[in-house]
Amino acid sequence: MDHDTYLMLERVEKKLDALTLIASQLWAEVKLTRDSLTLIGANIMQELDALQAQVTAIAGVEDSAIALLNGLSQRLIAAAADPAQVNAIAQALGAKSAELAAAVVANTPAE
């Protein structure tokens, strides 16, 4: 092998070494980015699960409130002709209103 060919091969080898180093650094960055995205995805999924639990709880509370109001409405309609029954329903409702108000406040997240 002549000297010029040797020098040319040496330059090519140095360039290949530099490209290998750059490729290795890029691969390390790709892996870090992948790991970061995986972590972000896991955090998002946890937040979505928590949000879903809140939505489910709220839906349960709403359904309970609707059932309560429907039941109360039906009782009042049925008792409309009997003032004593209407009064008894009003007293029972009054006794539970403070409890209900406290539960709503306790289970309402602060903004």
Image (spheres, rainbow, N blue to C red):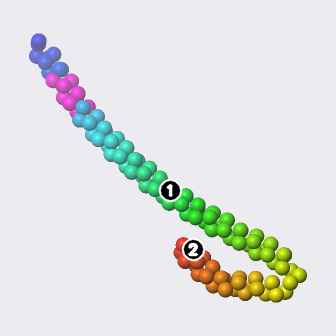
SS at mark 2 in the image: loop
Mark 2 closeness class: few <14, some 14–19, many ≥20 residues within 10 Å = few
Give the residue type that dot 1 points to: Asp
When asked about the image quadrant of residue 63, the answer is bottom right
Above or below, comparing residue 34 to residue 106 in the picture: above
- Residue 52 spot, x, y in % from top left: 55, 58
- In-image side of 79 versus 9 (left or right): right
| Foreground pick, 84 / 55 | 84
First in residue order: circle 2 vs circle 1: 1
At horizontal 84% and vertical 75% (from top left) the residue drawn is: 78
- Residue 97 spot, x, y in % from top left: 66, 83
Find the magenta span and give its range.
Answer: 10-19
Give the residue type that dot 2 points to: Thr
Please tell me the numbered disc located at residue 49: 1
Look at the image and say whether residue 55 sits in the magenta stretch.
no
At horizontal 63% and vertical 85% (from top left) the residue drawn is: 98
Check if mark 2's residue and mark 1's residue have beta carbons within 8 Å: no
